[in-house]
Image: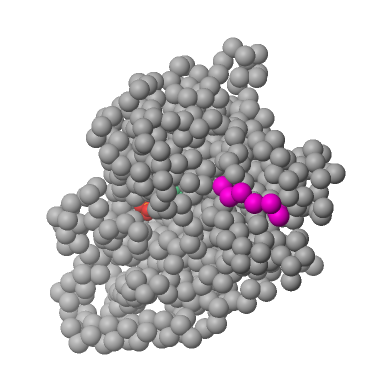
Amino acid sequence: MLLSYRDALNQAMREEMRRDSRIVLIGEEVGYYQGAFKVTKGFVEEFGPHRVVDTPITEAGFTGLAIGAAVAGLRPIVELMTMNFGIVALDQIVNNAAKIRYMSGGQLSVPLVIRGPGSAAHQLGAQHSQSLEAWFCHVPGLKVVAPSTPHDAKGLLKSAIRDQNPVVFIEAQLLYGTKGEVAEGEYTIPLGRADVKRAGTDVTVVAYSKMLLVALEAAERLRQDGLDVEVIDPRTLKPLDLESIVTSVKKTGRMVIVEEGWRFCGLGAQIADSVYAAAFDYLDAPIVRVTGEDVPMPYSRPLEDAAIPDVPRVVAAIHSLCGVA
Amino acid sequence: MTDMDEHDLRSLYRQMLLIRRFEEKSAEMYALAKIAGFLHLYIGEEAIAVGAVAALRPDDYVISAYRDHGHCLARGSDPGRVMAELFGKATGLCQGKGGSMHLVDLANRFMGGYAIVGGHIPLATGLAFATKYRKQDLVTVCFFGEGAVPSGQAHEAFNLAALWKLPVIFICENNRYGMGTPVARAVALYDNVAEAARSYGIMAERVDGMDVLAVRELMRTVVDQVRAGHGPFFIEAMTYRFMGHSMADPSHGHYRSKDEVEEHRKRDPLVLLKHQMLSQALCSEGDFKSLEQEVGEVVAAAVKFADESPFPDPSSLHADVMVEE
Ligand SMILES: Cc1ncc(C[n+]2csc(CCOP(=O)(O)OP(=O)(O)O)c2C)c(N)n1
Ligand SMILES: [Mg+2]
């Protein structure tokens, strides 16, 4: 069935909330407003305000509350209106959610999903256009998921909700309206498994979230130049499915990583490091990264365009890597 | 009251009118896609910025949240450069890097608009800390919505300001909603949000935020007191936003009724002041017509300036990330 990314998320949470009364959804405007991006449309009507809880603008407070509730046996889903506001809750996420299991010697656990849109939309400015996945990936104790398609979004969110650990689930404003085929009926997609979105033999492109769409478009354009590009979506950023990526690199011998986040200490640096360690001998050339520019996101359109990877830049990177002018 | 002469009231009215017409025009420009991203209009709330700033010296500090056009214009910023910033042009106040939510005009001591709710309130205490440290007799005025009051950052700032007797004036613009959430569902002491400040020993008062003269009068007393070193003050200005939360939100959502909006529109701050001026025979209808004419020309010129200005060159992308020696 053809579904938008937004509706796929809505279905995932709805199905899970129907089967498990321990799940509560908590966040700003999730109830009566139907979600800032309408992801939770119809929820308060179906599940009531005791399970779909509107909060004041207090991310540190309600994220901490959700962590406490998870420790006490609930399975909260925290909706951050955008991931930028997760920075306000970062202490709770890093110092509590990620560490409680370990510090308690395995006595306590935090089955919790923290979800919301990350990355830039159109000209939202520096404080509202950030790709922070590398921050979360850096912290032991968290899982991090960033799906690119409606089908993946649904299956992965259901798995995230059923997971025993805190999962940071990163969506994207510009993906909410995108549509794709979603399997009928009940299904889940396990966390930690990459997906080959397009098979090819000449070069491996790793991309996730919005950048997956950019990579696929670039691959399509390169077909006209006779290049056969394989595109892999890790889908779960942590734990990373290195095996699938390495399998692909062993086949193609070349790799490009596309990410929207800042280059310095970005996720691509980690992926490259892991691939070098596992498959150096199979690489015909150094790994190329296409990343966001190391600047706070400017508001102005031409500057914003210059700061975010786009199809021409990915095409150019692959051209230069594959020696096509 | 000797100061309530024609010239004085006319100048307050003109400033409110300028903000009103400027913002109506920006809404038009948004519809034409000349402006993008988030655009939060201040329409209905103009009396607060104008009344408060009228009680300040040019060297006092002003800082605001993302609904900041009114504060910036009231502070005396050039409408052309503000409009150019909204257009993302190189001639904008921040060279197109900030946008609507992040106006800054250092020359007019407008220290910025900030888009993380509550995040700028500690900054205000920092400005005040610096002026006190340097023994300057300056005050800092910090504008924020009632939705920011429950945030942890606000509370930490209130306590610091009170503890260290900082010369800061917190002005809470209580427009009764934070996005779609009515204050009664966001603040525990919703019919007296000033208690949040009082509980730290900060003196507080409520004012009719639709009455520019009432705002200015209260501010004059408060500014004297704060400037004299008696510590911070909290003003709760009761107001109403006539438009949607941002351009993405309909002017009355399902969270408030058309009737409610219409009811509040009867107390339009411009209409209130105009009636007062007419009834005291301080101005004629003709005077208002020529004011309209003059302000209309200023706004038209601002749009023309913004429209004809160049976009920033992409080569400026990395400029000003850091101070370069
Ligand atoms: C920390 C944080 N959380 C959420 C948001 C999203 N958001 C932007 S404005 C807003 C409502 C703010 O309401 P209020 O403080 O009353 O100001 P108003 O818009 O009414 O002027 C929200 C939830 C944000 N910008 N920052
Ligand atoms: Mg408000």
Rendered position, A46 above or below B245: above
Nearer to the camera, A49 or A267: A267
Q: Position of residue B225 (x, y in %)?
A: 46, 54
Q: Is residue B83 left or right of residue B297?
A: right
Please tell me which residue is depicted at 20% across the width and 87% down the height of the picture: B286
Rendered position, A264 above or below A63: below
Q: How many marks?
A: 0
Rendered position, B184 above or below A16: below
Rendered position, B313 above or below A45: below
Nearer to the camera, A267 or A8: A8
Q: Is residue A152 left or right of residue B250?
A: right
Regarding residue A262, the answer to whether it shows in the image is no
Regarding residue A46, the answer to whether it shows in the image is yes
Q: Position of residue B31 (x, y in %)?
A: 34, 71
The magenta stretch is A197-203
Q: Position of residue A186 (x, y in %)?
A: 39, 30
Q: Is residue A98 left or right of residue A256?
A: left
| Residue sitting farthest toward the right | A281
Q: Position of residue A36 (x, y in %)?
A: 37, 47
Instruction: Specify the color scheme.
Output: one colour
Please tell me which residue is depicted at 50% across the width and 63% down the height of the picture: A123
Residue A320 lies in quadrant? bottom right
Nearer to the camera, B224 or B64: B64
Please tell me which residue is depicted at 75% across the width and 61% down the height of the picture: A322
Q: Is residue A200 magenta?
A: yes
Q: Is residue A21 left or right of residue B109?
A: left
Residue A106 lies in quadrant? top right
Please tell me which residue is depicted at 25% across the width and 70% down the height of the picture: B270
Q: Is residue A82 magenta?
A: no
The quadrant of the image that shows the N terminus of chain A is: top left
The quadrant of the image that shows the C terminus of chain A is: bottom right
